[in-house]
Image (cartoon, rainbow, N blue to C red):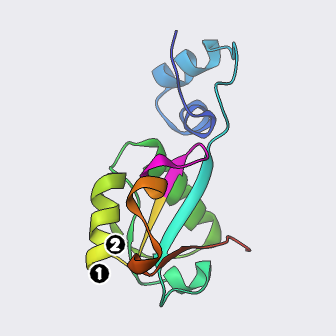
Amino acid sequence: MGIVQSDVLAFISSKQSSKLRNIARKIRLLHPLYNEEVHILASNDVDTFDDLATRKVAVGKKGSGTFLTATTLLKIAGMKVEPVYISGKEALRALKRGEVDAMFYVAGFPVKLFKNEVDENDKLHLLSIQN
């Protein structure tokens, strides 16, 4: 039994080694635990998803679900950013310090990290993905 994000499983099923593809094909969904959403928290000088181009963006640690989702979305959008490979908590601290311009975070709603660690004095906001 295992717990995995559905987009990660789909990625493994289609992109990785034949051994991993075979394992992924054998996995059956028993019950979804909850829906996860893609959140992009950004500094106030980033107005739109397209404004992320060429900026420093925390995309999650390499190999994480957030990393996979973020890099897939950026690739689909044809957008090049300066990726920073750090976890959610590290990314939020870096965003507050101005070391990155935005961060991706894949989590179920409500996002405890944002609820407990972000307030209006931080001058951050969620971006909408329109394209």
The residue drawn where x is 47% and y is 20% is: 19
Instruction: Say whether marks 2 and 1 touch (CB < 8 Å).
Output: yes
What label sits on residue 42 in the rendered view?
none
Determine whether, in the image, residue 34 is placed left or right of residue 120.
Answer: right
**Where does the C terminus fall, quadrant-wise?**
bottom right
Going by the numbered disc 2, the residue's amino acid type is Leu
The residue drawn where x is 63% and y is 71% is: 77
Determine whether, in the image, residue 108 is placed left or right of residue 35.
Answer: left
The residue drawn where x is 27% and y is 58% is: 90
Determine whether, in the image, residue 81 is placed left or right of residue 92.
Answer: right
Compared to residue 93, the image places residue 80 above or below, namely below
Residue 21 place in picture, x, y as percent: 55, 24
Residue bearing mark 1:
98
Residue 68 place in picture, x, y as percent: 49, 49
Which residues are drawn in magenta?
A: 105-113
What label sits on residue 95 in the rendered view?
2
- Residue 97 within the segment the image draws in magenta: no
Residue 37 place in picture, x, y as percent: 63, 49
Alpha carbons under labels 2 and 1: distance apart: 5 Å
Compared to residue 118, the image places residue 24 above or below, namely above
Dividing the picture into quadrants, the one containing residue 93 is bottom left
In this orientation, does residue 99 appear? no
